[in-house]
Image (cartoon, rainbow, N blue to C red):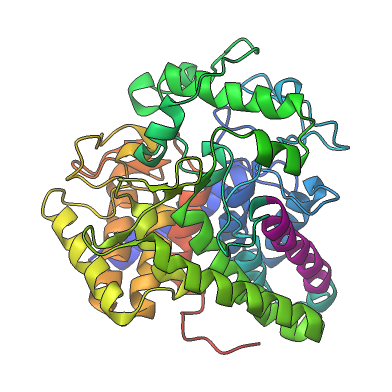
């Protein structure tokens, strides 16, 4: 266990990172490598701010929805201020929004962050602020239903790997390899000038990423046209699990700020999604796996995303036990949990972004999920390992599960936020009461 003095130092270091990455009400993930506001980063960061600066937590969420579109989508990047340190910038996205943004979204952590900030930051204006942001969250969830599940299957799809937040996961390999479209935008990568190429997606990945951006930009970012034309259409386990947990939190907010019709709408979506998740469970693999809607097939890749349904209370008790057993098999191969790709998979790369490294935010959600199912020892093991990684490897973007080394960007905001959330135990557990 870490001694008290070291814990105090770690907490102060994490707070200092958030302050250093503050750009006036919004937090960049890290200096230069990611110089804008990212969607799910900021949701976690808001929860981190709430542990010591409640006003700043509210502002993080409010600045994020400054970029929300009229149809309810919360873009994955909001370009509040110009920077040449990142590609692709607003000139590539061509979204024609009042505030420059990207044209796609990311896993919807916003409602979960809003609920937790509201429960912590009970200032005199908290009711009014939460009521306004509830409306933003509801519009976002309605957008997911309409734009990403137009056939009412219960499960939403992503139309770009970046929408998953897990950009170069092996789960996307086959679908990306099928792409025949070429980018029209010249590739001007900035990321590999900041950190080593061995820790980032490969050039061929970027060509395909930008090809999809160019395709959708040519369609004017119109959701129905994108759905019809997309050659990449996958039901991502993580996105659906995070959305289901966010619906649970949105429902709690709706009890205070919503209408009876809104509550019924949220409940209906949750019921459909919970039932539809059965199609993603692999009894043989003991994990949830993505589905490719273009081929109608299951994606044969076991990744950390497959454990995230625990976070939303989706598996049965037996499935939760199977997920715990599967993770134990992974940890027989690597000393640190939770690698982003199974170390039993030949595509596992311990240093390359989402193909092996550990991410603190995913660890946090998985640990909360295991705790929810009564696997307290495993949850505690994941939390303690996450703290150890940060202590020994720094507040890094991600970590090597074989060595514990910090990788990617340094002084990373959402990693710092998780450090604060774990240590100070300000985030209510899974058994918390409705508001």
Question: Residue 39 versus residue 404: which sits nearer the camera?
Answer: 39
Q: Residue at x 75, y 36 (%)?
A: 101
As drawn, 99 above or below 137: above
Quadrant of the drawing holding the N terminus: bottom left
* Whether residue 264 is visible: yes
What is the x, y in percent for residue 81? 77, 31
Classify residue 312 as left or right of residue 197: right
Q: Is residue 433 left or right of residue 290?
A: right
Q: Which is more toward the observer, 91 or 6?
A: 91
Q: Position of residue 80 (x, y in %)?
A: 77, 36
Q: Taking the image as drawn, is residue 12 in sight?
A: no
Picture residue at 44% right of the left edge, 36% below the top: 410
- Residue 401 % position (x, y): 24, 45
Q: What residue do we see at 56% from left, 15% from top?
A: 182
Quadrant (top left, top right, bottom left, bottom right) of the C terminus: bottom right
State how many labels appear.
0
Give the residues drawn in magenta, as a range. Answer: 129-147
Q: Is residue 46 above or below residue 376?
A: above
């Amino acid at each position: 266990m870490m001694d008290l003095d070291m814990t105090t130092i770690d907490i102060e270091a994490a707070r200092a990172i958030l302050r250093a990455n503050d750009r006036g009400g919004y937090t960049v993930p890290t200096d230069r490598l990611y110089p804008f506001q990212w969607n799910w980063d900021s949701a976690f960061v808001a929860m981190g701010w709430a542990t010591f600066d409640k006003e700043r937590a509210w502002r993080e969420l409010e600045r994020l929805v400054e970029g929300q579109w009229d149809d309810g989508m919360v873009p994955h990047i909001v370009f509040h201020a110009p920077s040449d340190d990142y590609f692709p910038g607003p000139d590539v996205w061509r979204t024609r929004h009042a505030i420059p943004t990207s044209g796609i979204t990311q896993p919807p952590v916003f409602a979960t962050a809003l609920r937790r900030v509201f429960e912590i930051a009970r200032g005199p204006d908290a009711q009014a602020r939460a009521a306004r942001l509830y409306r933003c969250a509801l519009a976002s969830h309605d957008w997911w239903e309409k734009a990403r599940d137009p056939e009412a299957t219960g499960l939403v799809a992503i139309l770009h790997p970046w929408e998953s937040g897990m950009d170069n996961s092996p789960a996307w390999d086959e679908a990306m390899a099928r792409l025949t479209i070429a980018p029209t935008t010249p590739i001007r990568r900035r990321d590999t000038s900041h950190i080593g190429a061995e820790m980032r997606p490969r050039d061929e990945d970027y060509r395909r990423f930008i090809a999809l951006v160019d395709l959708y930009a040519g369609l004017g970012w119109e959701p129905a046209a994108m759905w019809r034309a997309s050659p990449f259409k996958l039901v991502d386990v993580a996105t659906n699990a995070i959305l289901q947990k966010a619906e649970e939190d949105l429902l709690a907010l709706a009890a205070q700020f919503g209408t009876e019709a809104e509550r019924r709408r949220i409940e209906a979506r949750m019921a459909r999604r919970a039932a539809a998740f059965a199609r993603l469970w692999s009894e043989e693999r003991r994990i949830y796996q993505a589905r490719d809607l273009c081929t109608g097939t299951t994606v044969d890749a076991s990744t950390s995303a497959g454990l995230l349904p625990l976070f939303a209370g989706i598996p049965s008790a037996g499935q939760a036990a199977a997920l715990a057993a599967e993770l134990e098999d992974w940890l027989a191969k690597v000393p640190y949990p939770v690698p982003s790709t199974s170390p039993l998979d030949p595509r596992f790369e311990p240093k390359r972004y989402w193909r092996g490294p550990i991410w603190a935010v995913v660890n946090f959600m998985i640990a909360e999920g295991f705790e929810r199912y009564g696997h307290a020892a495993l949850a505690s093991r994941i939390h303690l390992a996450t703290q150890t990684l940060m202590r020994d490897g720094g507040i890094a973007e991600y970590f090597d599960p074989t060595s514990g080394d910090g990788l990617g960007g340094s002084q990373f905001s959402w990693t710092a936020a998780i450090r604060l959330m774990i240590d100070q135990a300000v985030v209510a557990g899974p058994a918390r009461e409705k508001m």
